[in-house]
Amino acid sequence: MKRTLFIFATVLSLASFAQKERPKTLIGNDPEDISGFGGVLFSFMPIDGDLSTLTGGGGAVLFDNTFFVGGYGLGLTGNHDFNSNGTEFTSSFGHGGFWLGYVIKPDDLLHMGVDTKLGWGSITTKSRATNAQVNEDDVFIFNPQFFGETNIAYWFKINASVGYQKTIGVDNDYFDAGDFDGPTFGISLLFGWFN
């Protein structure tokens, strides 16, 4: 009888220990509160007065389905061709770095948020006649945005954003400091675990 009571008491204490609530934490109580996503990014902005398209990708770790921290990379689709003093040139442009954001009411079908991209990149200019590189600028990118998002499925979202890109470090004979600054419009297809 004593043995049966001992086993019963042990099982009961283990069960009550297993049901004990976890302490409150800053980013949530369960491992499920941490998830992630990745996706395809499209960005449209004026470069040297011409509407240009940048494509790339990004991914992030998502905390409590609201705050995310990750990285991204974008590159100019095709090259930017231009003429300077009767000579033809072509330029490429790309950047990548940190991607930070906050999603407001992520469980609603349609919801909003804010994010920013902080990155480093380069603008490379070549002669079209000789394909020789004539200039390369290392630049820093700051691109804060507002976005609207739609939950298509538990694992898929579509995101549309508007923002403004500031490019620091443009210093050459072919472009002005503001030629890579301007409003941005983006579309993102995001796949992941949205708890």
Image: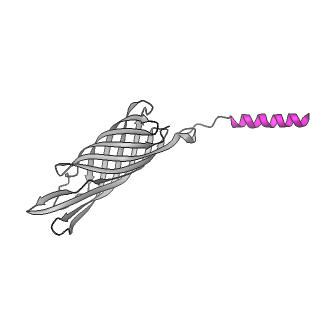
Residue 76 figure quarter: bottom left
Q: Is residue 156 magenta?
A: no
Q: Is residue 26 visible?
A: no
Q: Is residue 162 visible?
A: yes
At which x and y percent is residue 60? 44, 47
Q: Quadrant of the N terminus?
A: top right
The furthest residue to the right: 1
At which x and y percent is residue 151? 41, 34
The foreground one among 101 and 169 is 101
The foreground one among 168 and 159 is 159
Residue 123 figure quarter: bottom left
Count of numbered circles in the view = 0
Residue displayed at 55% across by 40% down: 32
The furthest residue to the front: 153
Q: Give the image's coloring scheme.
A: one colour
Q: In the displayed structure, would residue 54 be above or below residue 158?
A: below
At which x and y percent is residue 38? 42, 47
Which region is colored magenta? 1-21
Q: Is residue 15 magenta?
A: yes
At which x and y percent is residue 51? 20, 47
Secondary structure mostly seen in the magenta stretch: helix
